[in-house]
Each structure stands twice: as C-alpha cells, then as structure tokens.
Amino acid sequence: PPMDLAGARLFKGMLDRPTQEALVSALRDVVSVAPFFHPETRWGKQMSVRMTSAGRLGWVSDRRGYRYEPRHPTGAPWPEIPDLALEVWRAVSGADRLPDCCLVNYYGDGARMGLHQDRDEGDFSFPVVSISLGDDALFRIGGIKRQGSTQSAWLGSGDVLVLDGPSRLAYHGIDRLRFGSSDLLRDRGRINLTLRVVEIAP
Ligand code: MD3
Ligand code: FE
C-alpha cells in the first residue's frame, strides 16, 4: 500500500528497473524534439532546474510570468506524452481523463526547487502524478498555507507520488539531491515527470 505524506500517496519503488529504463529512453526522444531549457522567473532569475514538457500544453516561465503554452520556446509544438507515462497515470490517478501536460524537470548537481504551490492549472479536482527517475531527492510537503509544519521524504528512482484532495494545493519543494546515488541516467542527476490536467473540460 502507498505511504501517506501529508495526504499525498507515495508508491515506493512502483516502477521496476526495466520500466524506468524504457521511460528514460522515451524521454530521450522527447528531449530531442523539445530540449531542456532553464526557465527564467518573472524577476529575471534563472531557475536551477532545467525543464521541458510533452503533451498539448507545456509549462513555461519568463519575464511575462508562469503559464502553459502550446509550444516550446523554440516555437515547435511539444512532443506527445510517452505511453508508459500515460500507463502510470491510468494506474494511479483514478481520473476519467488523460493528462494534457507532462512536465519534465531535470535536476543536475546543486539544483533545487523552493517551496511553492502548483496553481496554474484550470481544475484542481484532478490529481497531479509525479514519477521520479535517477538520483534520490529530498522532497518537502506542507499544508495549503506557506507557514506551518512540513514533512520530508526521500524520493527514489521508480517512486510514484499522487497528489490529490487537500494535498493538491499543498506547498512543496525539493531541498536537495543525493547526487550520484543512482546509475539510471548516463549523466547522473534526477528527472521528475509530473502529469497534469491543465485545461478545463471542453
Ligand atoms: C504537491 N516538482 O514541477 S514532484 C513541480 O520533484 C514540482 O520536480 C517537484 O513541484 C519535482 O511543480 C516535486 C512532486 C509534486 C508535484 C506536484 C505537486 C508534488 C506536488 C502538486 C501539488 C502538490
Ligand atoms: Fe510543484
């Protein structure tokens, strides 16, 4: 059974090594069409995490702010979400529709993600599903207010986290990596996939 993490469900080791390798291979195709980029915040500061997306919509950030867009910053449409990632969504989300965005985050040595809420999506009643690949990362999750207590857990390669209910709007972030802890990725580091429903039903 999954572990409870502030209302989120953590499926430790859900994906076996061959499945993780197949996902990484599918992601190499995604990244060849939609290369990783360093998003810039509203205030012109580069994020330490590199990102790209697959699906009808992808997440972008620049001086105009955060938003979902139908195209990569190069102008090309985002590639399709890998089937294997959709299979994970079907297995754990309980949702009656497929995600329209798969955000792909790459953490190199020293990359982190500050405490934030995900609220750029149109309908918070759908879960977010996160898949971790590569090096271990220390994940932190709190409540729906920035103040208040938080819980931490290490996310390892093959772990799947489902954020729904109250945890959907919880503050969360990645404090640090155990860089080099996994040999899944050729260049070490960590990849996190987040599957999301961004657009409200047509
Ligand atoms: C809790 N990513 O992309 S994944 C993000 O590991 C993001 O790359 C982190 O936060 C990462 O926005 C954390 C776990 C996660 C993803 C989405 C959430 C936790 C969440 C949405 C709501 C609450
Ligand atoms: Fe987030």
Image: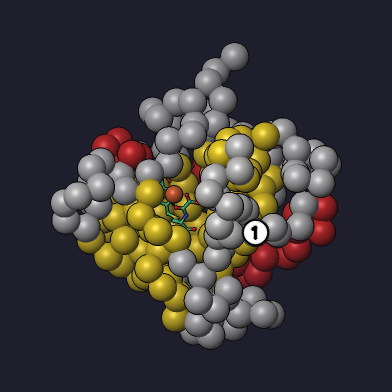
The residue lying at 16 percent from left, 56 percent from top is 149
**Which residue is the site of mark 1?**
38
Mark 1 residue element? loop
Q: Quadrant of the C terminus?
A: top right
Q: For this view, does 25 lie left or right of residue 109?
A: right
Give coordinates of residue 185: x percent, y percent.
64, 76
Q: Tag 1: Cα neighbours inside 10 Å, few (<14), some, or many (≥20)?
A: some
Against 115, is 135 above or below?
Answer: below
For this orientation, the residue located farthest to the left is: 148
Q: For this view, does 77 lie left or right of residue 149?
A: right
For this orientation, the residue located farthest to the top is: 202
Count of marks, rendered view: 1
Give coordinates of residue 166: x percent, y percent.
26, 37
Q: For this view, does 88 lie left or right of residue 70?
A: left
Label 1 amino acid?
His
**Picture quarter containing residue 201?**
top right
The residue lying at 70 percent from left, 59 percent from top is 36
Q: Quadrant of the N terminus?
A: bottom left
Residue 9 seen in this snapshot: no
The residue lying at 49 percent from left, 34 percent from top is 120
Against 118, is 29 above or below?
Answer: below
Residue 127 seen in this snapshot: yes
Give coordinates of residue 12: x percent, y percent.
38, 65
Q: Nearer the viewer, residue 82 or 57?
A: 57
Q: For this view, does 142 lie left or right of residue 109?
A: left
